[in-house]
């Protein structure tokens, strides 16, 4: 019962860390949830005098970085093969271009409406099947396929438009 009380107290500050980092309420919620899970794992090891609020914020920051790294890796997988395989011997210009492309892709995903973004991320970034997404969200499989396709089309059309410029 004690941890529940602590969790209720600390959740808003962990959520704020996620919101400041990602600018998205959904991502902030994911950060707060993951940080609470990790805090729970540390709960038995904590000293009574330790600043648990500071630890909670630190854990939330680490969760943000971990989520960002995971996304960046997945986004790199979505990029064309020749752009992914630049490696350490790539010129600074090529590395910058690769980073900018990954950042653009992340911004375009973030610009989708919340439902499309959620489904796109579950399907494209987390690799869940339509059945798994339907089970998790309660949305019909046919609707999931349509919304994911629509989101994918929006993202890639915007990329094409920007490449023309």
Image (cartoon, rainbow, N blue to C red):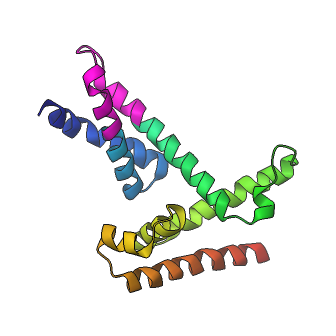
Q: Quadrant of the C terminus?
A: bottom right
Choose top left, top right, bottom left or bottom right for residue 109: bottom right
Q: Quadrant of the N terminus?
A: top left
For image coordinates 34% across by 74% down, the residue present is 134
Region in magenta: 37-59
Residue 165, can we see it? no
For image coordinates 37% across by 51% down, the residue present is 30
Residue 75 horizontal side relative to residue 20, left or right: right
Vertical relation: 157 (above or below) 29: below
Choose top left, top right, bottom left or bottom right for residue 162: bottom right
Vertical relation: 153 (above or below) 129: below
Please, what is the dominant secondary structure of the magenta stretch?
helix
What is the x, y in percent for residue 161? 71, 78
For image coordinates 47% across by 36% down, the residue present is 62
For image coordinates 34% across by 31% down, the residue present is 56
User: For residue 147: magenta?
Assistant: no
């Amino acid at each position: 019962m004690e941890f529940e009380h602590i969790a209720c107290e600390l959740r808003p500050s962990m959520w704020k860390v996620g919101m400041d980092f990602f600018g998205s309420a959904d991502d902030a919620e994911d950060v707060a949830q993951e940080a609470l899970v990790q805090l729970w794992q540390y709960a038995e090891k904590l000293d009574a005098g330790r600043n648990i609020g500071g630890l909670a914020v630190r854990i939330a920051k680490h969760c943000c970085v971990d989520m960002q790294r995971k996304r960046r890796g997945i986004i790199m997988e979505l990029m064309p093969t020749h752009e992914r395989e630049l490696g350490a011997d790539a010129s600074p210009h090529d590395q910058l271009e690769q980073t900018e492309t990954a950042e653009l892709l992340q911004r375009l995903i973030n610009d989708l409406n919340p439902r499309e973004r959620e489904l796109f991320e579950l399907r494209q970034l987390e690799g869940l099947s339509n059945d798994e997404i339907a089970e998790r969200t309660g949305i019909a499989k046919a609707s999931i396929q349509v919304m994911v396709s629509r989101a994918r089309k929006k993202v890639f059309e915007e990329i094409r438009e920007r490449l023309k410029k």
